[in-house]
Amino acid sequence: MAQGGAGVGDALASGLLTVVKIGIFHWLMTNYAQLATAAFDTFLTWGVSVGGDFSRATFTSPSAIVNRGFRSAVLLKDHIDRLSGGLGALAHGFQILCYWVDYYLIVIAFWLVGLHLVMTIIEYHLAVLVGAVLIPWGLFRPLAFFGESALGVGSRPAATRVCSRNAVTTLPQVPSSRHWAK
């Protein structure tokens, strides 16, 4: 009579482990939306821990970033308007052109940061959506690689927030237009 290597205890342990896995995945999928929101808030908190007045509301509203760019560039616009008065446009033509280029570079840079924020938020929510479909496949060992691909999306929002906070809090410290030489 041939005897197998596994006994009744091993079979029960394997069955119990499968039941525990199913229970954990059921709990995970039941609370997935709350866990994803908590994870996103945690990544935002990590990003703001560097310092500054960059709030969650600013991060989730990229138009506030673009608006901050226009407010930062208005100093150049005021200076250009002062230089352009009368015959100043002829005397300072090249300088005015350089200031206009700088003005548009600042506005475009903030617009790109806002666009990057939009893409980061969309990417995170798409990863959460894909995770809702792929994570249950991690229950079975041969298909676990499907579930693993949906778990590595956390560091991008934190890094984006750090970069955005640096731009938003640094540029308002630029001297006002009254300090510029005429």
Image (cartoon, rainbow, N blue to C red):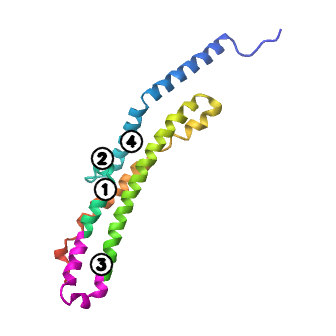
Image quarter of the N terminus: top right
Measure the C-alpha gap from mark 3 to mark 2. 33 Å
Identify the element where label 2 is drawn: helix
Mark 3 neighbour class, 10 Å CA radius: few under 14, some 14 to 19, many 20 or more: some
Q: Do the residues bearing badges 1 and 3 touch, measured as CB atoms within 8 Å?
A: no
Mark 4 neighbour class, 10 Å CA radius: few under 14, some 14 to 19, many 20 or more: many
- The x, y position of residue 136, in whole percent, is 54, 30
Which residue lies under the disc numbered 1? 63
Tag on residue 99? Answer: 3
Residue at 58 percent across and 20 percent down: it is 18
Residue at the farthest front position: 86
Measure the C-alpha gap from mark 1 to mark 3. 24 Å
Residue type (three-letter) at the residue carrying disc 3: Tyr
Identify the element where label 3 is drawn: helix
Residue type (three-letter) at the residue carrying disc 1: Ser
- The x, y position of residue 77, in whole percent, is 24, 74
Which residue lies under the disc numbered 2? 56
Residue type (three-letter) at the residue carrying disc 2: Arg
Q: Which residues are magenta?
A: 74-96
Measure the C-alpha gap from mark 4 to mark 1. 19 Å
Frontmost of labels 3 and 4 is 3
Tag on residue 40? Answer: 4
Identify the element where label 4 is drawn: helix
Residue 135, magenta (yes or no)? no
Residue type (three-letter) at the residue carrying disc 4: Phe
